[in-house]
Amino acid sequence: MVDFAADQLANLDMSELDCPNLLKNLEILSPDHVELAKILIQNGQSHLFNDWPESGVDDDEKRAFFDQVARLNACYFGGLEQYIKNARELLADSKAGKNPFDGFTPSVPTGENLTFGDENFINYEEAGVKEAKNAAFVLVAGGLGERLGYNGIKVALPSETSTGTCFLQLYIEYILALQEASGKLAEGETQKEIPLAIMTSDDTHARTLALLESNAYFGMKPTQVTLLKQEKVACLADNDARLAVDPQNKYRIQTKPHGHGDVHSLLFSSGLLNKWRDAGVKWVLFFQDTNGLLFKAIPASLGVSATKQYQVNSLAVPRKAKEAIGGIAKLTHADGRTMVINVEYNQLDPLLRATINPEGDVNCETGFSPFPGNINQLILELESYIEELKKTGGAIKEFVNPKYKDATKTSFKSSTRLECMMQDYPKTLPPTARVGFTVMDIWLAYAPVKNNPEDAAKVPRGNPYHSATSGEMAIYRAHSLILKKAGVQIGDPIMHVFNGQEVEVWPRIVWKPKWALTFSDVKRKIGGNCSVSQKSTMVLKGRNILVEGLSLDGALVVDSIDNAEVKVEGSTQNTGWILENVDYKDSSYPEEIRIRGFRINKVEQLEGNFREPGRHCLKP
């Protein structure tokens, strides 16, 4: 091995590369290690060996170093050499203050603006449910809940506390409900299973698997679910893209997450996309980890993709001008290139000022910016997606965001790294690609949970909190508004402050996806004159629950097996479930309660559990 290593390194001009500490360790290196050493040295990384002692000292740690280098090299398209090359280019652009949108002029792209509950919306929902059997879902779940003040994985957090259903369970129940509803519409065809891929990270992989296994995959077959673990990328210490040594361990390169754009390369390299195509999948739907409303928007959005034959469909919501959410824009370059892409809000306003509007990003006659707000949910046509990834290997256009010590931009406050975003996939597409968007009402589609109570309480009045508190209240509001649209009389919300956040408190209405996937499902299961007071809670957990002439002033919980039909009617009045304030600093409560600022005191309810098939009636 010594001769081989020496022979390999002899090909390098060691007088120029000057790496004596590596030469002292040749005898412990394998041939693969030598190849990796060559890549590092030829790309200006000899500083990594500056503090290495001679062989015989820490040899296992040195070999572990090269094992890490091998992983970093393998998980990046083009390897470490390409990573360093890309980093130098992006760091040079950053130092020079280069505008990534130089030469581009923005305009409003073509898309579909939907109004919940009208005939157009209902038709798209129906088309989407039919198409769902040909879909696969991808959940990007690489993050922990630390930013929320929650120490678990984010997908384990309850989406709401009336039922305690965690985000992952909610998503799986929606996919299974779509699978069943779509299968029923496919007469004579074999029932298809809708696959789910989950992108995890070192931080979340084991815990995500444990959550699935301990809950029997929430009713999904384990074979339907694929976990893809994202690797981190090397940190950069300076403008020359020298890799950063881990401050805790001189035999490790410091690493950080590369961003959720890695999902594309993981899907490509795993072979999963080809497997899905062979199984008849036509659409891939990407979604984020803590938006309890997003599946309300999925059927209609998928219907838009199928009807318009979009190769890329970005789900969007109306956004106020200058709101801190990216805008979807069509960018046309002076050389004729075009792309439809998310432009971050802090880039959109100056871009508009510099090109088409000296006032920048302003609201139009609708009261919103003409550029819809990107919510990071994508629907991609699988065939064209695979063809595109064959060219790129799934690599997504990257960016770098170094924090400089001063205006000279010569040194960093701390190490940086290249990052990529899932929604930047369209940047590499040809102008002929059919790229569009679907705009939904915010109340229906978008209530992410990402801010802890302290940060949320500092949000300027009138702006969204995006906290566990607002996320739960948004679910109740959406269900209340859907029922209201279906003809139910719903009590007006009251304003209440939890954890320093003033929120609308609607009736606490929750239903399982199998009760109603679409607005048509809701209308079919509601009859007569129904009313629900503001103080009320209604939880519907069965498939065949019919609500007929119900007057509810209190709490009602109905749970039934699939082949039991339950009619709920009459007037129900009881003390109900009461929301009680909880201080987020009060450690006597679990984290998932503290971060909401309230607990539910289940004082009194009418409860119906139906475990026998047949017809039943629940009437007080």
Image (cartoon, rainbow, N blue to C red):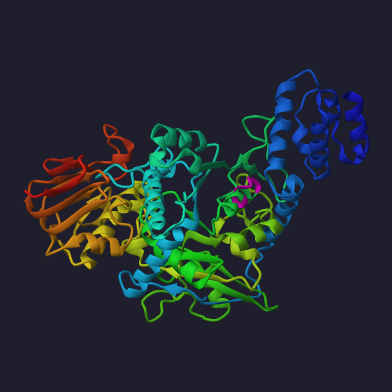
Which quadrant of the structure image shows residue 42? top right
* Residue at 80%, 33% in the rendered image: 32
Return the residue nearer the eye: 103 or 421.
421
Question: Is 202 in front, or is 110?
Answer: 110
Measuring 90% from the left and 28% from the top, which residue is drawn there?
Answer: 4
Quadrant of res 24:
top right
Q: Is residue 529 left or right of residue 508?
A: left
Q: Is residue 61 left or right of residue 552?
A: right
Which quadrant holds the N terminus? top right
- Is residue 394 shown above or below 308? above
Vertical relation: 357 (above or below) 89: below
Residue 152 is situated, as x and y percent measured from the top left of the image, at 41, 37
Q: Which residue extends farthest front?
A: 188
* Numbered label tally: 0
- Residue at 61% from the left image edge and 42% from the top image edge: 232
Q: Is residue 262 magenta?
A: no
The one of 366 and 191 positioned closer to us in this rendering: 191
Q: Position of residue 296 (x, y in %)?
A: 36, 59
Q: Work out whether residue 286 can be spotted.
A: yes
Please tell me whether the stretch drawn in magenta is mainly helix, strand or loop. helix
Q: Is residue 463 visible?
A: no
Q: Which residues are magenta?
A: 269-274
* Residue 92 screen position, x and y as percent: 71, 58
Q: Quadrant of residue 355?
A: bottom right
| Residue 181 % position (x, y) | 37, 56
Q: Is residue 487 left or right of residue 54?
A: left
